[in-house]
Image (cartoon, rainbow, N blue to C red):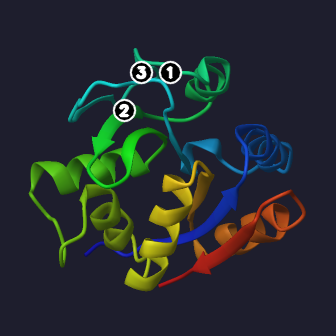
Amino acid sequence: MSVENSVVSIFNTHLEAEEAIKELQRSGFNLKKLSVVGKDYQTDEQVVGYYNTGDRVKYWGKLGAFWGGLWGLLFGSAFFFVPGIGPLVVGGPLVVWIVGALESAAIVGGMNAFGAALYSIGIPKDSILKYETSVKSDKFMLIAHGTREEVETAKKILDTTNCVESSLHCA
């Protein structure tokens, strides 16, 4: 397990998550260290997933302007269908961890690939269930990765936004 330092914030709407990303950007936080996760509302397909570790994903879903704008800022993008959660759109480094969990079949203790990816970056199992539940209920998850100092600074910034909750996970 490759443990990372991170801060995870939950937002009720994509607009609130987008504003938090802009606030982090204004503060000088490296946006390549951000991951965003949200459900896609529009698909009925049972797609396992596809991803692009470049700058764009070819699937926009209902929130096209939101996701389309983020792909220009974040590294990597993906669309996954996660059993038990549904269709997810993911941007940022978390894409690599989800793909790693899928490719290596690293499903940990009955977790899906999304949960296994969170676990692989040091998120405790009890928090993973809480985050999966938030995403299932159409909330947006923003994860800032980095050194302890970077994520502590990011948390202070995120705490000033309209996040529902914000939790620090450090190694």
Q: Looking at this rendering, what residue extends furthest in the top direction?
A: 58
Judging from the image, what secondary structure is the residue with disc 1 in?
loop
Q: Amino acid at mark 1?
A: Gly
Q: Earlier in the sequence, mark 3 or mark 2?
A: 3
Q: Looking at this rendering, what residue extends furthest in the right direction?
A: 160
Image quadrant in which you'd find residue 165: bottom right
Q: Amino acid at mark 2?
A: Phe
Depth-wise, is mark 2 or mark 1 nearer the camera?
1
Q: Residue at x 25, y 75 (%)?
A: 1
Number of the label disc, if any, that sits on residue 79: 2
The residue under label 1 is 61
Image quadrant in which you'd find residue 114: bottom left
Percent coordinates x, y for residue 169 in the rendering = 55, 79
Percent coordinates x, y for residue 8 in the rendering = 60, 66
Asked if the residue under mark 2 is in contact with the one under mark 3, i.e. CB atoms within 8 Å, the reply is yes
The residue under label 3 is 57
Q: Amino acid at mark 3?
A: Val
Question: Toward the viewer: 73 or 41?
Answer: 41
Asked if the residue under mark 1 is in contact with the one under mark 2, i.e. CB atoms within 8 Å, the reply is yes
